[in-house]
Image: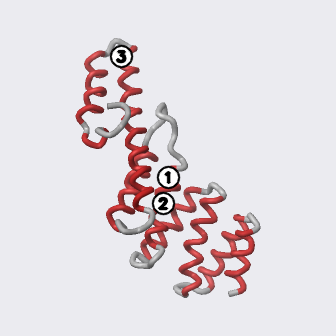
Amino acid sequence: DVLFNTGLAQLEAGKTTSAVKSFEDVDRLHPYSELAKKSILLQAYSNFQKGSYTDAIQASKRFVTLYPSHKDAAYAQYLIGESYYAQIPDITRDQDITNKSLEAYGDVIKKYPDSPYAKDAQKKIDFARDQLAGKEMEVGRFYLANDQHIAAIARFKNVIDNQSYQRTTHT
């Protein structure tokens, strides 16, 4: 209790690094306790708050794996999506993170459709798809500028034909 409450106080004070350490200690010293469950989730949240997205994803995945039917599993899955979403690069970069964000938000909708996070996940899926369509358009414009018209047409056609991109601004 003391470690957990210390972590909460540190999180409240904005000392996210110290909070993560306290929550890790609770989980390490008292595994599978009720406070350990909450600690894993708070580790994920604290890491997300401080911008340590990889650590937030790791802790969230651990929570979802260990406690898939817990009432906060939907939030943990949503936090995975949020962590990827926060790292989405501009369209000139590789979009692997965008695809991971899509997958994580898709899991929120598929596994937890009645959760309060499903609606926001759908909005962010729409944004991520728009991002991917924008990447296709950017590559198509590159090919067009280099007089590779057939390759450009293939990219533009993909935006039009791909069902995932039908609601994007690029169509």
Mark 3 belongs to which amino acid?
A: Leu
* Contact (Cβ within 8 Å) of mark 1 with mark 2: yes
Instruction: Say whether residue 20 is left or right of residue 159.
Output: right
Sequence-earlier tag: 3 or 2: 2
Residue ID at (63%, 54%): 51
Vertical comparison of 43 with 54: above or below: below
Residue 39 figure quarter: bottom right
Find numbered disc 3 in the image and state the secondary structure of the residue it sits on: helix
What colouring does the structure picture have?
Answer: secondary structure
Q: Which mark is residue 34?
A: none
The C terminus lies in quadrant? top left
Mark 1 belongs to which amino acid?
A: Tyr
Residue annotated with mark 1: 84
Where's residue 72, x and y in %? Answer: 48, 74
Q: Which mark is residue 80?
A: 2
Residue ID at (62%, 62%): 47
Q: How many numbered marks have been drawn onto this rendered protein structure?
A: 3
Residue annotated with mark 3: 144
